[in-house]
Amino acid sequence: MADKPSKGLADVVAASTALSDIDGQAGRLFYRGYDIHQLAGSSTFEEIAYLLQRGSAPGLGELNGYRAELVAGRTPGALVTSTLPQIAASQGPMEAMRSLVSLASADDPDESSNAAPANERKAARLTAQQPILVAAYHAAREGRESVPADPSLSLAANFLLQLRGTPPSARDAEILDTCLVLHADHTMNASTFAARVCAATLSDMHSAVVAALGTLKGPLHGGANEQVMRGLEAIRSTGGSDPVAAVGPVTRDRLGAGEKIMGFGHRVYKTEDPRATHLRQMSGELAASSGDDTYYRMSRQMEETVFAEKGLYPNVDFYAATVYHYLGIPTDLFTPVFSVSRMAGWTAHVMEQHADNRLIRPDSEYIGDRDLTWVALSER
């Protein structure tokens, strides 16, 4: 008798990749051989996007050239611009991202080509446009024009400028830039797998990214950071004069009732998610400078309680929630901001799939009825 299939494809190797690797037992993450602890805080998102998409760490000339590509490619096309107000009025953030990226393909000069040079250019444009789309969507739903991008600023700094309407501090921009580095790729997660399945049919890069966005929209993949923040807000609103003290009892009650606490545990990491280490530190720093560290202290209390009760460590989503909150990012944009970062990884995976392609077509186990006899409709 054949072995039962792995539910959810757990532990099944779905593809070979040179982009990222995880050591779940040791809690380590690598981008093209570089440890995330080396990269966080010492590399820029533009450098990491280049590393993933072009295959090696850029020299100064290569990085300047890539940055020039991002500046030249970030302006959305006419179709996106003309439909943005209607989309912002009728669709939620992740639905809007899915729609806008699909529309952007119509104005991309390389839309019909999967050749390596065309894919490199499309990857740069998609990476450049995603933060513009998120900020423009937010401005449109508020009934205002998005602030023009500043070509002298980094992708992270420009995003905060356009989202907030005022230039960010240098440190805020650095922290968001580090967040983008931490989220840029993560092996064969659900959205990346969806992108590669689509790309394996030799569909185009925009279609593959739309598949990834549609997958990220699902609450079991994207949205966990939003749920973390909403959970903290709910405790604070009902926790009386000391919401930090309320965290422990509320968390224990929820765990006792069999509820899942969002932001804890991971399918791969058996110890602390290495990205959470950096996000915890940045959350504490931002909390201290904000003048109200309540959410950070609540988060620390929740982390201690969940570990004591279940032995679970925080994952990347847990402290990302309070980092984004302290940066002034609206809670319902947390997942779209994740897509800003992951665009670097998604597009790199599409290029890797196209470069050494085989149609992804897994088998299935049939569990339905057998040997039934069909009765004509007139005889039923």
Image (tube, rainbow, N blue to C red):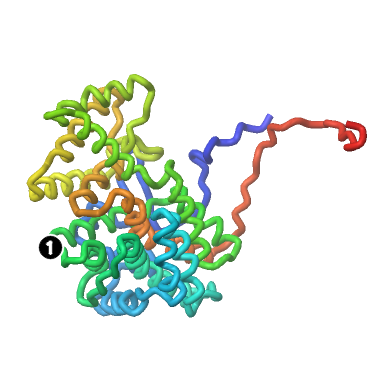
Residue at 29% over, 75% down: 67
Name the residue nearer the viewer: 21 or 229: 229
Residue 55 is at least partly visible in this image: no
Name the residue nearer the viewer: 118 or 295: 295
Q: Which amino acid, mark 1?
A: Ser
Count of marks placed on residues: 1
Residue at 34% over, 70% down: 128
Quadrant of the drawing holding the N terminus: top right
Q: Position of residue 362 (x, y in %)?
A: 62, 47
Q: Is residue 342 above or below residue 51?
A: above
From the viewer's perspective, tell me whether residue 312 is left or right of residue 353: left
Residue at 15% over, 26% down: 245
Q: Is residue 23 above or below residue 81?
A: above
Q: Classify residue 253 by image quadrant.
A: top left
Residue marked by disc 1: 169
From the viewer's perspective, tell me whether residue 140 is left or right of residue 240: right
Residue 99 is at least partly visible in this image: yes
Residue at 22% over, 30% down: 238
Q: Is residue 163 above or below residue 287?
A: below
SS for callout 1: loop
Q: Position of residue 158 (x, y in %)?
A: 24, 68
Q: Classify residue 220 by image quadrant.
A: top left
